[in-house]
């Protein structure tokens, strides 16, 4: 039996969710007797037998949203026990209705279950209303994006609200793209650059997996560089695919291709070697860096050489990259991978290819 994580007890009573965590009693023996209606089950919520009350509760959960009329009618019952149980059950039924939808995309592992917990608690009233009144997917994503933006503007918020708000935006964005692949969705790149979003994506694997689905569904939207840097920042595996696509696209300028090369340096995948080798012959100018009174100019082939050295497990600084600056996202700051003049560049190339018999 499925149970939602314990933080939902902040919205629903602990007793109500304990009913979801374990079976109320042993399964009833097979019988030809007709199944009780939702209205009859509501009446059984006031039965003297605890086992009978629990069986009725579980059967009402199984009926789900179709028990709406019976449960809402039971909320007005003169028996206080029945009315209270109906209120709790209706909240549970609506929360579980959302889970039945979300699990189809994110799976039903404990981590996925915990992520839905956060999605629900980020905006319980939204999920309650959505369960009762399904709406067009076109309007749900912009609403969830706006809610994420508002969350970021609040300053300090709970980690689970941050994760839930992100997951809601991704989830409804993917649904919208699946329904209408050609529609353009408002970008979230600017929001993902916020430190709290980046931290949430790093810390929560289930959220990161959902972000992967979002990135794949919206891969044609937004600049490739923005998507690549977001993937690198959050250590997501699709960074390699984005980088390869950028290097294969002749329309991508060299100033952006340099980041793709560094992304492949981080993966150290042998299948990517051809892209880096090709770039070793590309002298397209990149950045100018002023360092210690010197003017340092970089070319695409410089970045490719640094990536090659790094992939071999060596330090580019040992071979002549004298202005190297580390970067936690891209391994090195691209602008630091240049030289004062062509003589320095040639010396570095020769040192690398001469060392250890490289040819």
Image: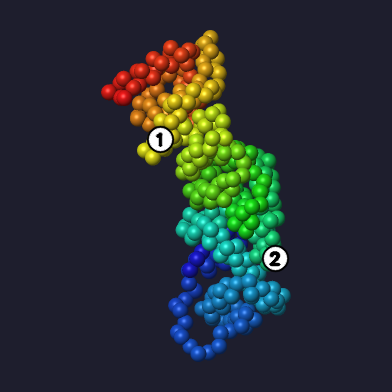
Whether tag 1 and tag 2 are in contact, CB under 8 A, the answer is: no
Mark count: 2
Residue 311: image quadrant is top left
Q: Earlier in the sequence, mark 1 or mark 2?
A: 2
Q: Could you give the CA–CA distance between mark 1 and mark 2, rounded to whole angstroms?
A: 53 Å
Could you tell me if residue 328 is visible in this image?
no
Q: Which residue is mark 2?
A: 133
Q: Nearer the viewer, residue 49 or 329?
A: 329
Where residue 174 appears, as percent x and y from the top left, is: 59, 53
Q: Is residue 354 above or below residue 253?
A: above
275 to the left or right of 124: left
Q: Badge 2: how crowded within 10 Å, few (<14), some, or many (20+)?
A: few
> Comparing marks 1 and 2, which lies closer to the viewer?
1
Identify the image quadrant of residue 223: top right
In the image, residue 81 above or below residue 296: below
Q: Name the outermost residue toward the bottom.
A: 32
Q: Is residue 30 visible?
A: yes
**In the image, 344: left or right of 169?**
left
The outermost residue toward the left is 357
The residue at 47%/35% (across/down) is 263
Identify the secondary structure beneath mark 1.
Answer: helix
On the image, numbered disc 1 is attached to which residue? Answer: 274
The residue shown at (64%, 75%) is: 67
**Residue 61 at x, y percent in the picture:** 57, 72
Image quadrant in which you'd find residue 126: bottom right
Label for residue 190? none
Q: 354 or 127, which is in the foreground? A: 354
Residue at screen point 65% across, 42% down: 152
Element marked by disc 2: loop
């Amino acid at each position: 039996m499925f149970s939602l994580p314990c933080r939902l007890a902040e919205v629903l009573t602990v007793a109500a969710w304990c009913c979801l965590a374990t079976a109320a009693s042993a399964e009833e023996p097979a019988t030809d007797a007709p199944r009780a209606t939702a209205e009859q089950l509501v009446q059984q919520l006031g039965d003297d037998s605890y086992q009978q009350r629990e069986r009725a509760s579980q059967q009402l959960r199984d009926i789900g949203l179709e028990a709406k009329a019976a449960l809402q009618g039971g909320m007005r019952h003169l028996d206080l026990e029945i009315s209270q149980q109906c209120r709790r059950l209706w909240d549970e039924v609506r929360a579980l209705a959302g889970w039945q939808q979300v699990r189809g995309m994110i799976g039903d592992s404990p981590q996925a279950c915990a992520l839905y917990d956060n999605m629900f608690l980020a905006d319980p009233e939204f999920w309650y209303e959505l369960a009762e009144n399904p709406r067009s997917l076109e309007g749900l994503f912009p609403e969830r994006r706006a809610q994420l933006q508002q969350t970021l503007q609040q300053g300090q918020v709970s980690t689970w609200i941050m994760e839930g708000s992100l997951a809601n935006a991704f989830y409804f964005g993917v649904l919208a793209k699946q329904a209408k692949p050609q529609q353009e969705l408002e970008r979230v790149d600017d929001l993902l650059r916020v430190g709290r979003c980046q931290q949430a994506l790093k810390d929560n694997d289930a959220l990161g997996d959902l972000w992967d689905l979002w990135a794949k569904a919206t891969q044609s939207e937004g600049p490739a560089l923005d998507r690549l840097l977001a993937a690198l920042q959050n250590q997501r595996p699709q960074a390699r695919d984005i980088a390869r696509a950028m290097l294969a696209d002749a329309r991508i300028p060299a100033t952006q291709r340099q980041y793709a090369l560094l992304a492949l340096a981080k993966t150290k995948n042998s299948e990517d070697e051809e892209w880096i080798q090709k770039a070793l012959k590309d002298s397209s100018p990149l950045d100018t860096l002023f360092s210690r009174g010197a003017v340092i100019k970089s070319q695409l082939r410089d970045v490719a050489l640094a990536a090659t050295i790094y992939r071999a497990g060596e330090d580019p600084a040992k071979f002549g990259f004298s202005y190297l600056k580390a970067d936690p996202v891209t391994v090195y700051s691209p602008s630091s991978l240049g030289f004062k003049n062509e003589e320095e560049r040639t010396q570095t190339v020769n040192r690398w290819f001469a060392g250890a018999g490289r040819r």
